[in-house]
Amino acid sequence: MSRTPEDEEQASALAGDAGALEHLAAGELQVLGRITDASNATLFALVHHGGRALRCVYKPIAGERPLWDFPDRTLALREVAAYAVSAASGWDVVPPTVLREGPHGPGSVQLWVDPGGAEEADAADGALTVHLPEPGAGLVDVVADGSGGEGWLPVVRAADERGRPVALVHADDERLRRIAVLDVVLNNADRKGGHVLPGPSGTVLGVDHGLTFHVEDKLRTVLWGWADSRLLPAEQEVLQRLEADLSAGLGEVLARLLEPAEVEAARRRTQRLLRRDRMPRPGQGWPSIPWPAF
């Protein structure tokens, strides 16, 4: 699929366009349709500002389903909090995200990560086709039993519907590992393979961070391939900066989105990760891999 000028503008915004946040926060939000396979209301939209339109995902708080373990009407706030941590880390692995009013009430609005745009499929009925990225961005996969080959890390082995051995694997890739490190800080309870997407210029981005920042340890991810590995020097440096920032400016930002105990828990998790100097291993008493995994 050929790239349009609109695609180029979208890629520029995802790559760190300084005006992306203002565009998301101040622009006029036009809902085009709903992503039907999402568990909560997830709306595909355009946000118009300054003569250009950017594609985005709008998740209204009113469309959040109640959960037994997360407070009601907080998932959109957690999406924005996850972006704040990503931005503070300097890794920028979460697309720009804001909390704002929309046609269906307040919610999170995040830049759309898209491999080729969205287009009208039928001018007669105005139907919209949204081109979704391949799940896992070529970095998470299920393969015939084994490691997946050189450069791949096994996560778990299982059997398919015919009893044949298969393995969930992910790439041994620094871009993916950054997401895995921040997921520990965020306490991400829902890192599916489909939540890892290809970004512009070879970047890899993580999306869907509504199930984060719980005070109890709930890390659930498909990125266990680095379990018990030592932290890299660059990761230690980022985590040290985050630890300090969680007691300062970043902590103040998160305090407007989360409960004080949740902010403190994030700071303690960062401290613990630095102290142990190793990526965590799957724990007991809580499913370590989300279902479905993609």
Image (cartoon, rainbow, N blue to C red):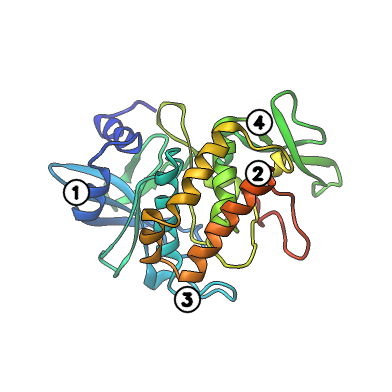
User: Which label is found at residue 72?
Assistant: 3
User: Which label is found at residue 218?
Assistant: none
Q: Quadrant of residue 69?
A: bottom right
Q: Give the alpha-carbon distance from disc 1 to disc 3, as whole Å.
A: 30 Å
Q: Is residue 190 visible?
A: no
Circle 1 is placed at which residue position? 48
Q: Give the alpha-carbon distance from disc 1 to disc 2, as whole Å.
A: 36 Å
Farthest top residue in view: 150
What residue is at 71 percent from the left and 56 percent from the top? 288
Circle 2 is placed at which residue position? 223
Where is residue 19? Give x, y as percent: 22, 41
Q: Label 4 neighbourhood size at 10 Å, few (<14), some (14-19), many (20+)?
A: some
Which is closer to the viewer, label 4 or label 1?
4
Q: Label 2 neighbourhood size at 10 Å, few (<14), some (14-19), many (20+)?
A: many
Q: Is tag 1's residue or tag 3's residue first in the polypeptide sequence?
A: 1
Which is closer to the viewer, label 1 or label 2?
2
Where is residue 249? Give x, y as percent: 36, 54
Q: Give the alpha-carbon distance from disc 4 to disc 1, as whole Å.
A: 39 Å
Q: Label 3 neighbourhood size at 10 Å, few (<14), some (14-19), many (20+)?
A: few
Where is residue 165? Give x, y as percent: 84, 41
Q: Amino acid at mark 2?
A: Leu
The residue tagged with tag 4: helix, strand or loop?
A: loop
Q: Quadrant of residue 168?
A: top right
The one nearer the camera, 245 or 33, is 245
Q: Is residue 100 above or below residue 170?
A: below
What residue is at 69 percent from the left and 37 percent from the top? 230
Circle 4 is placed at which residue position? 172
Q: Is tag 4's residue or tag 3's residue first in the polypeptide sequence?
A: 3
Q: Is tag 3's residue or tag 2's residue first in the polypeptide sequence?
A: 3
Q: Quadrant of residue 98?
A: bottom left
